[in-house]
């Protein structure tokens, strides 16, 4: 379970990286290093007057790098990150898994039934059973306990099996 969580986190981290942001960060790093080189070549020239031509060439290369880095940053404003098809699918799959987990938790804790009752979404079988129970309790109607039990057994196979088992136990007790 822990391995799966780590793999998911790594995939999400890989999916969440912005290529344009990475390019901008690297271009800024190049510009910073070029400025450091210019400063270093200035110190070299002050300390060693005989290396003036090499220092000038070094500064010019560093300035060219700095110009290129600034041009990259300027052109990067027109670049749009593209999400791969599989990354989009992984995102939707994660949303679906979370949705299923929420439904399972609600159902297993009984909150799902409470929500269904609150919004009035009652199963047709349960409504029919309730109607029969109300009719059974009304003295002016012919439905009785036998009709209720028969309807309950017909509607619910698990109840029917439990009823047969209880009836068999009762019949053993009478003999």
Image (spheres, rainbow, N blue to C red):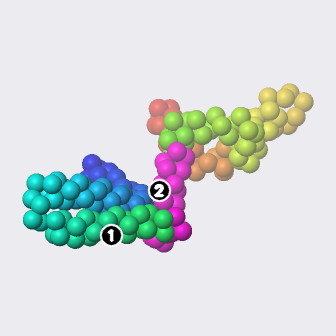
Residue 143 percent across, percent down from the top left:
81, 38
Q: For marks 1 and 2, give the one nearer the viewer.
A: 1
* Within-10-Å neighbours for mark 2: few <14, some 14–19, many 20+: few
Would residue 100 be visible to someone looking at this image?
Answer: no
Q: Secondary structure at mark 1?
A: helix
Q: Which mark is residue 94?
A: 2
Query: Residue at horizontal 40%, vertical 60%?
Result: 24
The one of 41 and 74 positioned closer to us in this rendering: 41
Secondary structure, magenta segment, majority class: helix
Query: Residue at horizontal 54%, vertical 50%?
Result: 99
Would residue 95 be visible to someone looking at this image?
Answer: yes
Q: Of label 1 and label 2, which has the lower sequence position?
A: 1
Q: Tell me how many marks there are.
A: 2
Q: Quadrant of residue 62?
A: bottom left
Q: Which residues are magenta?
A: 76-103
Query: Whole-Å distance between the Cαs marked 1 and 2?
Result: 46 Å
Residue at mark 1:
64
- Residue 98 drawn in magenta: yes
């Amino acid at each position: 379970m822990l391995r799966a969580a780590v793999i998911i986190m790594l995939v999400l981290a890989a999916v969440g990286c912005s290529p344009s942001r990475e390019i901008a960060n690297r271009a800024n790093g190049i510009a910073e290093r070029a400025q450091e080189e210019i400063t270093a070549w200035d110190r070299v020239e002050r300390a060693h007057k005989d290396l003036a031509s090499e220092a000038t060439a070094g500064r010019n290369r560093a300035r060219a790098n700095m110009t290129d880095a600034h041009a990259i940053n300027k052109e990067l404003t027109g670049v749009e990150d593209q999400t791969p098809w599989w990354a989009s699918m992984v995102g939707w799959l994660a949303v679906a898994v979370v949705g299923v987990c929420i439904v399972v938790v609600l159902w297993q804790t009984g909150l799902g039934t409470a929500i269904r009752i609150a919004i009035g979404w009652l199963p047709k079988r349960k409504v029919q059973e309730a109607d029969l129970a109300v009719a059974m309790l009304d003295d002016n109607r012919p439905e009785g306990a036998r009709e209720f039990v028969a309807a309950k057994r017909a509607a619910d196979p698990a109840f029917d099996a439990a009823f047969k088992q209880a009836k068999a136990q009762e019949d053993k007790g009478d003999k």
